Amino acid sequence: MVTCPSCGTVAADGSAFCEHCGTALGASAPAAVAVLETPDEPATPVCRSCGGTIAPDGYCEHCGELAVSARDHWTELPSPLVGGVCDKGRRKSRNEDAMALAVVGTTAVLVVCDGVSNIPDSDVASLAASRAARDVLATAEPQTVSSWSALLITAAAAADQAIADAVGDMTGRAEPPSCTFVATVVDGPTVVAGWLGDSRAYWIPDEGDSHQISVDDSAANEMIARGIPRARAEASREGHAITRWLGPDAETVVPQTATTRAQGPGWVLVVSDGLWNYCSEAADVADLLHRTAEKVGPSPDAIAGELVRWANEQGGHDNITAALARVAAPFDTVQTEETVSAQSAPPAA
Amino acid sequence: MADFRTEVFQNEFLSDGATDVHAIVTVTSSGAGTAASSGGGVAEIVIIDTSGSMSGPNIEAAKYAAQVAVDQIADGTWFAVIGGSHVANRAFPYPNAPVAIVQMEPGAREEAKRAISFMRPSGGTAMSTWLRLADAIFAMVPQAAQKHAILLTDGRNESEPRAELSKAISDVTGHFQCDARGVGSSWEVAELREIATALLGTVDLIRNPADIAEDFKALVNESMSKGVADAELRVWAPQGAQVLFVRRVAPTVEDITSRRTEVNALTGAFPTGAWGDESRDYHVAIRVPSKPVGSEQLAARVQIAVGGDVLASGLVKARWSDDSSLTARINPEVAHYTGQAELASVIQEGLAAKASGDEATATVKLGRAVQLAAETGNEEATSRLRRVVEIDDEEKGTVRLKRNADKLDEMALDTASTKTTRVRR
């Protein structure tokens, strides 16, 4: 039996493409690892543009819009306070971003992985990695900050192993699939993030200064460290090169970690560069998020959907992922150590 | 049942802000079988001009050709023979026979050939009456799924106003198919083209009366070999889009845009007549509202339907891109048939200008035709043009009108103007 690596539909023997979403069914395509759970998907596909029926040829019967596969666009909402949207964007032919969200008790888990562009199976790698990391974090017992940090390291290792399991034999591949990694655990007011690469976690309080919790493993950041202005560094051609990642050719898969302790209500926002390319500075991201919440209301899936729509409107050059968790009361008033990792202190907002 | 398949040739990439999508859709049928196997039966009517002008070798050749055609008509086929002048007369079944159309069998075949031998030329020419009588006879066999007529004339439609003919053509359109043939140089290409175009047939010139029989034989055989009685081309375009035109471009150019009948608000059907094992190309142009760069949408579904069932579907797509190496590419099939369609119209316009004495326009138009025929590799068109103009520079389209061009050569160029060559792949 062959299962579509994108949407999980069981394919007829010998088919080269998934009948449901059109994804190529490679002989080495992994089955179980990359099955997407889309319980909300209606039996008859409906056009996202006009609500018309999708014909068997994959286009809307009414407006001709190309039907979007479940891999190209999906929403997760594990609780009313935790949700996200992962989207192909406008320019890329595949969605190589992935996200995996979970809520266990009062703990929220947000994982975003961004597959490295245009390498075959990067989309498979990112989905497998994000889900493996989520599963490690979501099955853990209540933790202290330091044990969350250790668990993030375990989660990254599990994500890396999931990539190896999903993409199979790497011999003969010039460029093995790889992806970024950012995982955030929101445990009451404690926010612990771990990352490899340039997918980001932001802390955006309702009031007061926002900051980026993660620090990009990117050439741009190395340039910023050398004193080049952020905007210029991020716009530079080599700025987007990442210095760490997950995958068979990764030198290290140990993430940097950082912790933030919320002093009041706010949002943890985890995004891929498809979003922050259009809005990078924490203060700007905070403005965008607050404007967006005012427009569409407080539901995290609605906010994420609107952020994705906004990024598409800016050009949608890359895949776009936005995931949010709401941090609400109670908050202790005791100031605690904000960071546990000396090398990853959050930059001043 | 025949198998249909479609193949779409297009450049689906549009630049930012672009709206027009062009595609060539090749429709190919196979396993069509024969007309006799299509069920419901076939009806065939041969219409011979019996006006006074036919006297001499023409009428003898036409009668012989009609007899050859009758020989080719398969047993079981409904058939009749009409003699046409300023009125139409049923030659067979005999005018006093109780039925207007009979099924072919050896006895009927012999009797029909005898009836044809009695045909005598006299009177004028009013083709509307011929078409109306054929229509009335075909109406006697509603069970026949496929109805086909051959019409042969040697002269102009001089006994009635042109509007009478046009009215009759429009009244019988959709009832039967008709191939029209002119013998000699006294008939009017435009008149027969109007008949053949509306009635989904072909028009051709027969230079030598002795060749009529061979042509009739081929036409009847062709008709008998069409196992799909009636197929329609369907074009779906999305909400908000506009179908700019639908053209058949091979084997001949024909704009069929105006023949649309509605299947539903977004889908139009265009009649294509009967199909044997063959391949036809259609050029479809759709205007869709522009979308942001990176968007993809379907611009048209081009389908073949028989008896209301869609048997094959081709997808015409639109993808907006800012990569000019993708968007600037012109699809070779679209370019080829755009040129061939222009070739047909400049030949017709050039000859019309020449006939009305406007030599300047004729020279420009036929010059352009020479250029297009060379560009699109239509060597037959080039050799037909050569008989009408002196070519000074093929590439630039510089020509001079021949002073003593043969009328038959001009008519041959005119009748064949819509014939296209296929793209060399």
Image (cartoon, coloured by chain):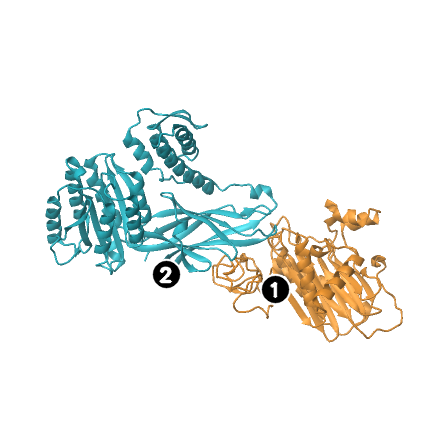
Give the secondary structure at mark 1. helix
Q: Position of residue B406 (x, y in %)?
A: 28, 28
Could you say where residue A72 lies in the image, as x and y percent from the top left? 60, 59
Task: Tell me which amino acid carries mark 1.
Answer: Val
Q: Are marks 1 and 2 in contact (CB under 8 Å)?
A: no
> Which of pointers 1 and 2 indicates the residue nearer the eye?
2
Between A33 and A282, the one nearer to me in the picture? A282
Q: Residues within 10 Å of mark 1 (few under 14, many from 20)?
A: many
* Residue at (22% x, 38% y) in the render: B154
Chain for mark 2?
A: B
* Residue on which the image places disc 1: A33
Asked which secondary structure carries label 2, the reply is: loop
Image disc number at residue B308: 2
Label 1 and label 2 in one chain:
no
Total marks drawn? 2
Q: Is residue B224 visible?
A: no
Residue A96 appears anywhere in the view: yes
| A98 lies left or right of A216 | left
Chain A image colour: orange
User: Which one of the lettered chains is coloured cyan?
Assistant: B
